[in-house]
Image: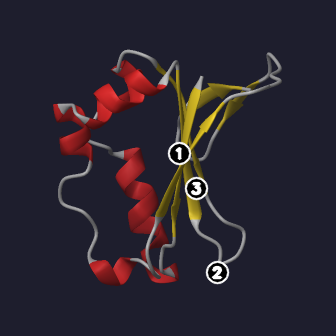
Amino acid sequence: MFCVMNRVPVAPEWRHAFEERFRRRAGQVELQAGFVRMAVLRPMSEDTPYVVETLWQDRAAFEAWVGSEDFRQAHANPLPKEAYNGEGKMESFELVASAETSISVKTSISIETSF
């Protein structure tokens, strides 16, 4: 498995707009071949960035999505520069170990996920 974590420093007055973009996202990432899971994590303090985590079957699946029209649509019309408190950072990882339960959790952005 291949994991990508985007750390996005969002200005406090833009948090709602940032979250709303994921609620109404243009791309259908969950329909992409090799997609496993996405989570948008809201920070508990204003000086901590949001984390957008995506999990893919492999790196090739992620790279195919980045090259897709859905990706371009999802990233079209970005928020203005003042919405961000600095530069974001993308990190990628290879999954070494994981643990899950069969409990289903409904998140605040209306995505059903099993952890």
The residue at the point 41 percent across, 46 percent down is 23
Label at residue 51: 3
Q: Which residue is mark 2?
A: 47
Is residue 95 rendered to the left or right of residue 69?
Answer: right
The x and y percentages for residue 19 are 46, 58
Q: Amino acid at mark 1?
A: Ile
Residue 75, position in %: x, y? 25, 51
| Left or right: residue 112 compared with residue 80 | right
Q: What kind of residue is marked 3?
A: Val
User: Image point 19% across, 43% down: which residue?
Assistant: 72
Q: Quadrant of the N terminus?
A: top right
**Which residue is identified by label 1?**
109
- The kind of residue tagged 2 is Asp
Q: Nearer the viewer, residue 49 or 114?
A: 49
| Circles 3 and 2: CB atoms closer than 8 Å | no
Q: Secondary structure at mark 1?
A: loop
Q: Secondary structure at mark 3?
A: strand
First of labels 2, 1 by sequence position: 2
